[in-house]
Image (cartoon, grey):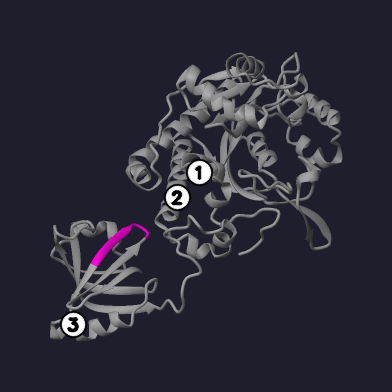
Amino acid sequence: MKRLFLNELKDHFNEEVTISGFVDSIRNLQWVQFIVLKDETGKVQITVEKSLEENKELVNIIDNLSVESTIKVTGKLLSSPKVKLNGMELIPKTIEVTSKNLSELPFNYKDTSTVNLDTRLDNRYIDLRSDKNILLFQVQSCIVRYMREYLYNNHFTEIHTPKFIGAASESGSEVFEVKYFDHKAYLAQSPQFYKQMALASGFGRVFEVAPCFRAENSNTSRHATEFTSFDVEFAYINDFNDVMDLEAEMLSYALQKVKEEYGAKIKELFNLDIVVPKTPFPKMRLADIYDVLEKEYNYKVPDSEKNDLTTEAEKLCYKLAQDKFSSEFLFVIDFPAEKRAFYHMRDENGILQGYDLIWRGVEITTGAQREHRYDYLVKTAKEKGLGADVAFYLDFFKHGCPPHGGFAIGIDRLTMLLLGIPSVKESQFLFRGPSRLYP
């Protein structure tokens, strides 16, 4: 049976329709009863005249109905310009109560301004009923959909890699150890090694949208122990500029689609305009950024901290990018290699062939050209003190692997920045952090 969503009702005036949803509000007046019914796409008013004999049973049902119950309603849809809610109303013939709200809600999800965030997260199934949260995850789904679409249109294959891994390969201090029958296993920090294995297998262009796990005891607004990562890897690149160009085009494409589908609703509920970025995105050398931040914004850091972006420098990059390039995005390049993964390619001067992408003052991507030459990989792995743990990975490159690169975007952080949400705890369906494992 095809379900009729409330945002489709405008095509069914003067027809008998059947709709379902949550009871958003009830007004029980002397001569008339009103129900506002909501689903994930919108709301509609249901009107019952008390004086009509044929409505006696409906009146009794509504008299005993509680807000947040769910109902199924069949009736005639009328155009009613006087009705403020979308200029329509449903005159019901039958109302079936499909579930009852049995008690008072733990808080008013329509106004959480005075509600503690932990209380909201403890009762996330209630918190998610708000119009803003429903829109949030519709927008998140939309941006993932169109990033996927961009990649599909550009000959990428979606893969699904294992999340149980046998070696704490990338950083042994930041992995979750689990019991795997009679062995130790670890939850994957990323699909990085397996993305590269796919390219060594001849796949050419791959991506994955999947959970990643980081055992970081971090309590910030943008970190989580489990998050959804959008990982991309592709072969036969000339250099890491190809990686930056593809990411910029993908994000611009997806944000344009989000603006078209949800821009008006985002403006209504979040009071934000979706800015579709122009490509190519601007880029600056790390050293040049610190020079500009010091000269133009009076931001100074010790030389010892200039081998990476500080959190404050990231924030200032938003202003810098707007002032200098009229852009919300900024690629930062020419990082020293010592703090980056061993598989990131370096040039003859030891400069990383990679980048960070800063959006609205927050890093959303670390990307790079990967080292695909076996002897160089063995050397850099040894420099990082890695041996048996990465032996299986090094095997991928023994029999030929094309030049390649890639990047990863945290979907939850991307959503947080897109909608101006203060914490990733609110842009994840269910947040996982050092002190939160339930619900």
Using a 10 Å C-alpha cutoff, classify the residue at mark 2 as few (fewer than 14 neighbours), some (14 to 19) or many (20 or more).
many
Q: Which residue is mark 2?
A: 136
Q: Position of residue 55 (x, y in %)?
A: 18, 82
Q: CA distance from mark 1 to mark 2?
A: 8 Å
Q: Please report contact status of discs 2 and 3: CB closer than 8 Å, yes or no.
A: no
* Residue 415 disc label: 1
Name the amino acid, label 3. Answer: Asn
Say which amino acid is labelled 2.
Leu
Q: Nearer the viewer, residue 335 or 383?
A: 335
Q: In this orientation, which residue lies closer to the viewer: 354 or 23?
A: 23
Q: Residue at x 61, y 29 (%)?
A: 314
Q: Residue at x 36, y 38 (%)?
A: 259
Q: Is residue 42 magenta?
A: yes
Q: Are marks 1 and 2 in contact (CB under 8 Å)?
A: yes
Q: Which residue has dot 3 on it? A: 55
Circle 1 — which element?
A: helix
- Distance between the alpha carbons at the discs numbered 1 and 3: 46 Å
Task: Report the residue at 31% width, 67% height from top.
Answer: 37
